[in-house]
Amino acid sequence: MTNIDPLREELSKPEYAGLSDQQCADLINSKTVEVVVRVENAEIKRQAIMAGIWPGIIAGQRDANAQKAGLCIGVIEWLNDSRMPRTDMDLPAVQTMLAGLVACGLMTHEQATAIDNLKNQSEPWAIYNGLPEVGIGLVRAARR
């Protein structure tokens, strides 16, 4: 059975007063919630390739500067490791890697921010609240 308490709470807001059941369902189904997700490593790598960053990382693994080479090797190993298909971009180690790539001149701060922002996704309000797509039946049940 679906828990419609989040829908009851949402429908109690003033923006739904005077709307028909169908209008409420349409409005709710158009709402989204911003969520932070783990990012597929393939998507991070794709973004790095599309931004022209990846070739510098590949070349950087042979750099005379041991710190830069080590960073590049670490990034390549991390993104190619099939045992860890997704990354929590908020982990301190991940943020340190991105900052290191910026400090080494392999990417700009803006590029690092774009990669970091891959974690920000929109999810339909109903799904976020454990509901199916909202129709007039659910609206009527929640309004009782």
Image: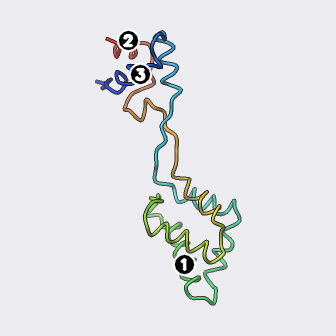
Element type where label 3 sits in the image: loop
Tell me the residue that label 2 is attached to: 140
Q: Nearer the viewer, residue 35 or 14?
A: 14
Residue type at numbered disc 2: Arg
Residue 100 sits in quarter: bottom right
Foreground mark, 3 or 2?
3
Q: Are marks 3 and 1 in contact (CB under 8 Å)?
A: no
- Which labelled disc corresponds to residue 13? 3
Element type where label 2 sits in the image: helix
Above or below residue 112? Residue 57 is below
User: Residue drawn at (54%, 82%), measured in percent from left and top?
Assistant: 70
Foreground mark, 3 or 1?
3
N-terminal-most mark, 3 or 1:
3
Rendered image coloring scheme? rainbow
Image coordinates of residue 17 in percent, x first then y, are 45, 13
User: Residue drawn at (38%, 19%), measured in percent from left and top?
Assistant: 12
Tell me the residue that label 1 is attached to: 71
Distance (Cα) linking label 3 and label 1: 51 Å
- Which labelled disc corresponds to residue 4? none
Above or below residue 52? Residue 127 is above
Image coordinates of residue 107 in percent, x first then y, are 65, 69
Element type where label 1 sits in the image: helix
Residue type at numbered disc 3: Lys
Q: Nearer the viewer, residue 135 or 103?
A: 103
- Image quadrant holding the N terminus, namely top left
N-terminal-most mark, 1 or 2:
1
Above or below residue 125? Residue 103 is below
- Image quadrant holding the C terminus, namely top left
N-terminal-most mark, 3 or 2:
3
User: Residue drawn at (51%, 52%), measured in percent from left and top?
Assistant: 119
Residue type at numbered disc 1: Leu
